[in-house]
Amino acid sequence: MDADPVGPRRADARRNRARILRAALEAFAADGMLVPLDDIARRAGVGAGTVYRNFSTKEALFKTVVADRIERIVEEAKALATAEDPGGAFYGFLEWVVERAKFNHALCDALALEGGMATFDSECAEAEFAQALATLLANAQAAGAVRADVNVADVRTLMTGCLFMERSHRATGPPGRMTALVGAALRPSAVTGPLPSHNETLPVSRNETRCEDCGTPLRTRRTGRPARFCGPACRQRAHRRRTPKTG
């Protein structure tokens, strides 16, 4: 009996599709949306007709590439849910996402809040990503590695900010510096109090000092002795309290 050719044909089709997606990812990263589909076919080692049979337009291919990246990010987050080091898993995931997405504007938009993933035909991925990230955050908070007053929306916003800051900072600083600074701010040791509301002042860090008279946070001087008072009035009041009255 002759072998059924359907199986091999389907396997070839899957391999061709995978090659096209890999080639498209590289092409879009290098040249953006201006890259022709013929160039993507050449990179993938297939004919232009094969590309068009899988993706009718360049826009359809672009959306599929972004959706595929989103799915891989969600899979990575789920895989880290049972990590032995919850804090390392959380911060490592944040760095991993920023490193892979910082130069992809579409992926940056997809990772932002307000249902950005739905734009790339990944409605389910939005909920899955939020849930997986919430699990990583909760695990890290339970382990004492992330401050307890941070929520998933905070992390999503900070992650989006890191993506844009890393792009703008690349000419003046080492890669990953902005993400590392954000990560440091998320650690419980970063501040001594809860996050402020919109009309409250920022909490004082361990390295800051307060006015000896009124308790107002003082700026750290670059040179010279540390400041003790926030102004002349506080200094005079403190001086009067120390000076014994006569007469």
Image: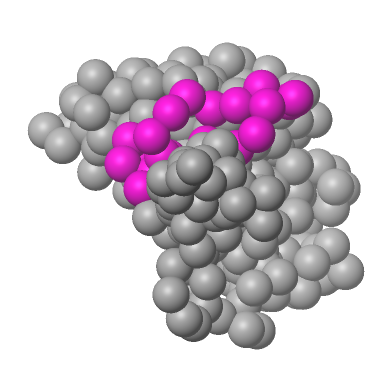
Q: Residue at x 33, y 35 (%)?
A: 188
112 drawn magenta: no
Residue 1 visible to the viewer: no
* 106 relative to 193, above or below: below
Residue 170 visible to the viewer: yes
Q: Quadrant of the N terminus?
A: top left
Q: Nearer the viewer, residue 9 or 140?
A: 140
Q: Residue at x 24, y 43 (%)?
A: 88
Q: Position of residue 164 (x, y in %)?
A: 69, 58
Q: Quadrant of residue 104?
A: bottom right
Q: Is residue 35 left or right of residue 219?
A: right
Q: Nearer the viewer, residue 44 or 199?
A: 199
189 drawn magenta: yes
* 18 relative to 26, above or below: above
Q: Position of residue 129 (x, y in %)?
A: 52, 25
* 14 relative to 49, above or below: above
Segment tinted magenta in the rendering: 186-206
- The total number of labels drawn is 0
* 185 relative to 180, above or below: above
Q: Residue at x 58, y 44 (%)?
A: 237
Q: Position of residue 95 (x, y in %)?
A: 42, 53
Q: Position of residue 163 (x, y in %)?
A: 63, 55
Q: Is residue 132 left or right of residue 158?
A: left
Q: Residue at x 66, y 22 (%)?
A: 197
Q: Residue furthest left?
A: 84
Q: Quadrant of residue 202?
A: top right
The structure's colour scheme is one colour
Q: Nearer the viewer, residue 246 or 108?
A: 246
